[in-house]
Amino acid sequence: MSKSITELADSIAKLEKQLSEELDRQQDRFRYSFEGRRVRFEQEVEEAHARLKQAVIPWLFSSRLRHVISAPFIYAMIVPIAFFDLTITLYSTSVSGCTAFGGSSAASMSCWTGTSWPT
């Protein structure tokens, strides 16, 4: 291997070690661990969360009126925004001929940059 590739590989290994150490410090700070694909908090953290948890009805009575009134309008926009995003995605892939969900990398690159790449 060339010298620059070796230096890059060493740099990547050093950064991976730093990332691992930082993640370990964060796990100690927030008192959690990974069990397979799940995050598991310590019992004390779960108990504190259970004490602070508030049911919906008491929250409604303790919240400001403007928050309670605006919440249904905010959550009602999730479906129209998702539909709008889907339509724009389908339109942009069908009109421009881009294959956003596959295809050769050169052809896909030309979709995003607006330039034609030799294939």
Image (cartoon, helix red, strand yellow):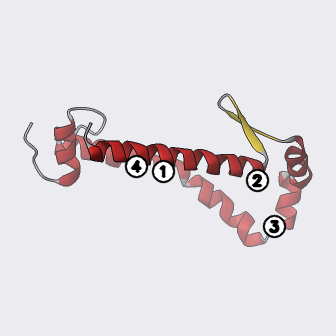
Q: Is residue 54 above or below residue 42?
A: below
Q: CA distance from mark 2 to mark 1?
A: 40 Å
The label on residue 85 is 4
Task: Name which residue lies at 72% across and 67% down.
Answer: 67
**Of 56 and 54, which appears nearest the observer?**
54
Amino acid carrying label 3: it is Ser
The label on residue 63 is 3
Q: Is residue 62 left or right of residue 69?
A: right
In which quadrant will I find the N terminus?
top left
Say which label, 2 or 1, has the lower sequence index.
2
Q: Secondary structure at mark 4?
A: helix
Task: Name which residue lies at 69% across and 33% down.
Answer: 38
The answer to whether the residues at label 2 and label 3 have Cβ atoms under 8 Å apart is no
Say which label, 3 or 1, has the lower sequence index.
3
Say which label, 4 or 2, has the lower sequence index.
2
Tag 3: Cα neighbours inside 10 Å, few (<14), some, or many (≥20)? few
Amino acid carrying label 1: it is Pro
Q: CA distance from mark 4 to mark 2?
A: 38 Å
Q: Nearer the viewer, mark 1 or mark 4?
A: 4
Q: CA distance from mark 3 to mark 1?
A: 27 Å
The label on residue 26 is none
